[in-house]
Image: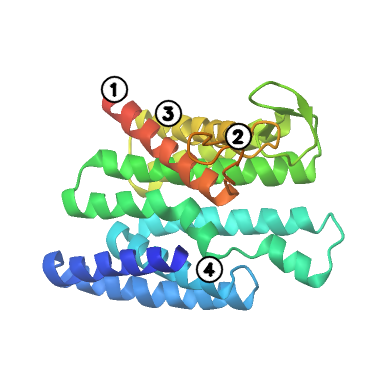
C-alpha cells in the first residue's frame, strides 16, 4: 500500500509540475526533492527510517516543501525529529536485541503515510486552491499525529502510569491499544500545542488560529484511542458477521492512525469555519 501511495502522490506532483506550476514553483519542487532526498538518506543512515520508509518520506517531504513551502516543511521536521528522539529514549529504557531495537525505532513506509497522508493531501489542496481551511486541515492532521506519538511514547512507555481503556475505563496495561493515562493525556495536549504555536509563527497566523489546531490535534488523539479500543481489543472485535460469520477484521495500528489524523483534519476544518 505504501508503494501505491508513493506512485499516486508522485504522479500528482508531476501533474502539478507540468500543468499548473510556474517557474518559481518548479524551482521549489525541485529544491524540495533534493532536500527531502538528502534528509531521508541521513535518516536511513541513522536507522530512523527503513528503506521503504525513506522512499515514502522522500515523496512526502517533496510535496511538503515543494507545495507547502518552508513553514510546512519545518513543522513536518519538528514532528519527525521530536517523535524519533522520544521513541529512541523510550525504547532505551527497555532491553532490546539489536533487531528489536531497530524495529521499535525505524519508521516504515506504511507508518509514514498513516501519519502523513491527510497532511500531504491538504497541502496539495492548499496549493491548488489557496483556501486557508486546507492549511488548517493539514495542520490538524499533523497535530493529531504529534499528539498521538507523544502520548504513546511519553505516557505509556516512559512513565508507565495507570492506564484505562477509553471505551469503558477498564484498567489495562500501559501501552494497550485504546488506553489513556494522565501523563499520556498531558503529553498529547503538549504535542498538539507545540504544533499550534509553531504554526502561528511559520504561517503568520493570528492567535485565534491556535484553538482550532490545538483542539483538532488533541481530539484527534482521543479519537485514535477510541478507535484502538473498539477495533484492536480482542474482547471488542470489529466484525462483519453478515459477510464472514464468526470472523474478525484485523485493524492495524497504521489504519487507526490514518483514520484519527483524518478526524483531526475534519475537526480543524469545522472549527476553522465556525470560529474564524
Per the image, label 2 sits on a secondary structure element best described as helix
Sequence-first disc among 4 and 1: 4
Q: Which residue is mark 2?
A: 225
Per the image, label 3 sits on a secondary structure element best described as helix
> Percent position (x, y) of residue 111?
54, 58
Can the viewer see residue 197? no
Q: CA distance from mark 1 to mark 3?
A: 12 Å
Q: CA distance from mark 2 to mark 1?
A: 26 Å
Q: Which residue is mark 4?
A: 53
- Which callout, 4 or 1, points to the residue nearer the camera? 4
Q: Is residue 155 left or right of residue 84?
A: right
Sequence-first disc among 4 and 3: 4
Sequence-first disc among 2 and 3: 3
Q: CA distance from mark 4 to mark 1?
A: 37 Å
| Nearer-the-camera pick, 211 or 9 | 9
> Residue at (60%, 34%) from the top-left corner?
225
In the picture, which quadrant includes the C terminus? top left
> Percent position (x, y) of residue 85?
66, 58
User: Looking at the image, do the residues carrying marks 4 and 3 touch, with CB atoms under 8 Å apart?
Assistant: no
Q: Which residue is mark 1?
A: 274
Instruction: Determine which of the numbered discs, if any, sits on residue 211 in the image.
Output: 3
Classify 180 as above or below 275.
Answer: below
Q: CA distance from mark 4 to mark 2?
A: 24 Å
Per the image, label 1 sits on a secondary structure element best described as helix
- Which callout, 1 or 3, points to the residue nearer the camera? 1
Classify 175 as above or below 208.
Answer: below
- Which callout, 2 or 3, points to the residue nearer the camera? 2
> Residue at (23%, 71%) from the top-left corner?
14
Q: CA distance from mark 4 to mark 3?
A: 32 Å
Q: Is residue 229 left or right of residue 220?
A: right
Amino acid at each position: 500500500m505504501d508503494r501505491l501511495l508513493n506512485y499516486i502522490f508522485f504522479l500528482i506532483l508531476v501533474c502539478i509540475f507540468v500543468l499548473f506550476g510556474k517557474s518559481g514553483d518548479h524551482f521549489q519542487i525541485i529544491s524540495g526533492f533534493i532536500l527531502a532526498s538528502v534528509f531521508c538518506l541521513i535518516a536511513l543512515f541513522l536507522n530512523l527510517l527503513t528503506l521503504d520508509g525513506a522512499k515514502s518520506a522522500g515523496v512526502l517531504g517533496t510535496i511538503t516543501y515543494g507545495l507547502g513551502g518552508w513553514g510546512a516543511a519545518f513543522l513536518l521536521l519538528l514532528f519527525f525529529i521530536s517523535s524519533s528522539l522520544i521513541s529512541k529514549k523510550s525504547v532505551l529504557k527497555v532491553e532490546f536485541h539489536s533487531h528489536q531495537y531497530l524495529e521499535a525505532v525505524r519508521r516504515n513506509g506504511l507508518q509514514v503515510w498513516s501519519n502523513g497522508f491527510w497532511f500531504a493531501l491538504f497541502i496539495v489542496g492548499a496549493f491548488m486552491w489557496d483556501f486557508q481551511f486546507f492549511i488548517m486541515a493539514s495542520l490538524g492532521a499533523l497535530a493529531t499525529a504529534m499528539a498521538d506519538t507523544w502520548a504513546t511514547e511519553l505516557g505509556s512507555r516512559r512513565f508507565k502510569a495507570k492506564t484505562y481503556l477509553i471505551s469503558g475505563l477498564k484498567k489495562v496495561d500501559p501501552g494497550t491499544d485504546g488506553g489513556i493515562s494522565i501523563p499520556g493525556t498531558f503529553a498529547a495536549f503538549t504535542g498538539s500545542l507545540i504544533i499550534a504555536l509553531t504554526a502561528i509563527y511559520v504561517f503568520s497566523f493570528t492567535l485565534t488560529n491556535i484553538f482550532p489546531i490545538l483542539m483538532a490535534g488533541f481530539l484527534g488523539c482521543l479519537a485514535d484511542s477510541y478507535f484502538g479500543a473498539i477495533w484492536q481489543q480482542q474482547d471488542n472485535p470489529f466484525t462483519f458477521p453478515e459477510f464472514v460469520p464468526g470472523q474478525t477484521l484485523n485493524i492495524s495500528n497504521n489504519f487507526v492512525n490514518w483514520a484519527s489524523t483524518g478526524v483531526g483534519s475534519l475537526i480543524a476544518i469545522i472549527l476553522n469555519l465556525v470560529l474564524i
